[in-house]
Image: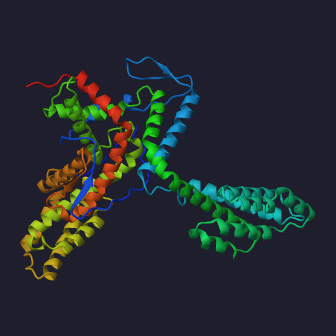
Amino acid sequence: MPGCAETSDMDRKGKGEADSSKDRSDKGSEDAMDVRGDTAGGGSSRQRYDSEGAASSDQGKRQKTAQGFAIPGIAASPPKFVSLEEIVTAANGFKNMALAHEIAVDKNFKLQKYEPPDNSLHRLVKDVAHKAFWDTLEEKLNEVPPDYEQAMVLLGEIKEDLLSLLLPQNAKLKEEILEVLDADLIRQQAERGTLDFQHYAQYVISIMGKMCAPVRDDEVRKLTQIEGVVPVFRGILETLNLMKMDMANFAIDVIRPDIIAKSVEYEKMKFAEFLKIQADGLQYTRKWLLHHLMNARNDDVICSGEDKNAVRNLTASVLGEAYLELLEWNDLNLYPETLMMDQGRFTDLGKKFCHLVVTGSVLLVTTSTAQPLQAVAAFKSKLKEHINVLLEDSYTNKDLEKIMPNVAEQVVKEVAEGLQTYGFRPLDAATEKLLKGQIMEIVKDDHKIRQLVRTRVREFIQQSITSPVAAPLRIPPGLSSLQTELTAITGQFLRLVSHNRAVFGEYYTNIIAEGVSTTPPLTE
């Protein structure tokens, strides 16, 4: 479906897991947007390659490996063996690569506390385990004489947490914590029956108040108002966990520039390690690129493998079109290996692309019918916001078929109000009916206005990722009211594409060059 990626209810075997990172928006410029890419050219073919991909075939399943097992590869490759240690090492490296990638491409990336969904088994187990721990601690402290063994372990953990939050320059505070929370001293007090846990709780809270970020001041202050030894220590541990998260995010902010500077080379190294344990770790990347190479040849983009300039231009064209496909990805096709870490981001951008095309189509249809409102920016801005609300969570033809009647009703209502507000002649009943029908027709793939908007949006994004130099891009005709959304999507897409191309560009170039050399050019 043009402008929206159609989903399927079929079982999608081997579909890559998407990141859940949240997408961010870039601020659009007033009249144009400065963007820079590394390639040039690009086509417009959208032919799908389900038949080539054979997503449900046995070959489409990603291979798992284990110690002593041969990894099946392509027919011409000899059996390859890897040890379990190599697999574990590569897996850990891939996790580190994913974290570095998140920090590099998402300027707002932060670690967040995970909470299991309500009513889930994970939530139930967690709540039961925590309640059992604290109930047991309270029972032991209420025994006569009190059993301090579990409490001693808890105090030791709290001391280690406090020490882990100290910076190198906090040497004096470190000495104080080690002295006051000395395990031998506390054990002696417990044996003599003079141990005052409330005293230690207040000391820990006072130290936390000195160390915490300003955002935690209220939470630390509330700890002083909690009554009972067990509840206060429970609150201390929960707050310490939040403080450790704050410290981790502070560390990320400090090292972020260094990670960004080195992320490309680091990701290259880790991906190369990953390829060593895979018989063909670029299987779906190759299928993705060769599909677009074939489309380029079908569009009479002919070059010889011996002409380096022609190959370079063809590579730029193929990559530009291949990246654009990610905005309208067919879920029946397996995702390229080199894009797996950003699949969630590209999927989210694809949804925004879909909304942008549909919203732009509705606005163009509306203003062409209610022409007096075409020059009223406030009306178009308000209508755009309301359309976006109605289209939320609608990404497929089926979704649009359900929601477009509501969109049509809203448009007719706002057009009537707008014409009255700005002193224009109202639409007659026949024109209102015509406007409703035109908006309902937008759900069709071959709708002319929708095709036009999709093409203009696509071309704008394509220019941004294929332009070899930084240059302002003019907002496409008829889409000025969507400038903020268009530039935001384009900026996010460009950032992802640029980083991906910097890391995997060499693989892409080799795959396309090999495809050119093994497939004879078309002749007239």
Considering every residue shown, the one lying at the far right of the view is 192
Left-right relation of 395 to 455: right
Left-right relation of 405 to 97: left
Q: Position of residue 43 (x, y in %)?
A: 18, 40
Q: Position of residue 430 (x, y in %)?
A: 6, 71
Left-right relation of 512 to 107: left
Q: Quadrant of residue 322?
A: top left
Q: Position of residue 249 (x, y in %)?
A: 54, 57
Residue 37 shows up from this direction = yes
Q: Nearer the viewer, residue 432 or 269?
A: 269
Q: Position of residue 52 (x, y in %)?
A: 27, 31
Q: How many marks?
A: 0
Report the residue at 32% width, 31% height from top. Answer: 286
Report the residue at 12% width, 68% height from top. Answer: 367
Q: Quadrant of residue 294?
A: top left
Residue 434 shows up from this direction = no
Report the residue at 32% width, 40% height from top. Answer: 332
Report the residue at 14% width, 81% height from top. Answer: 422
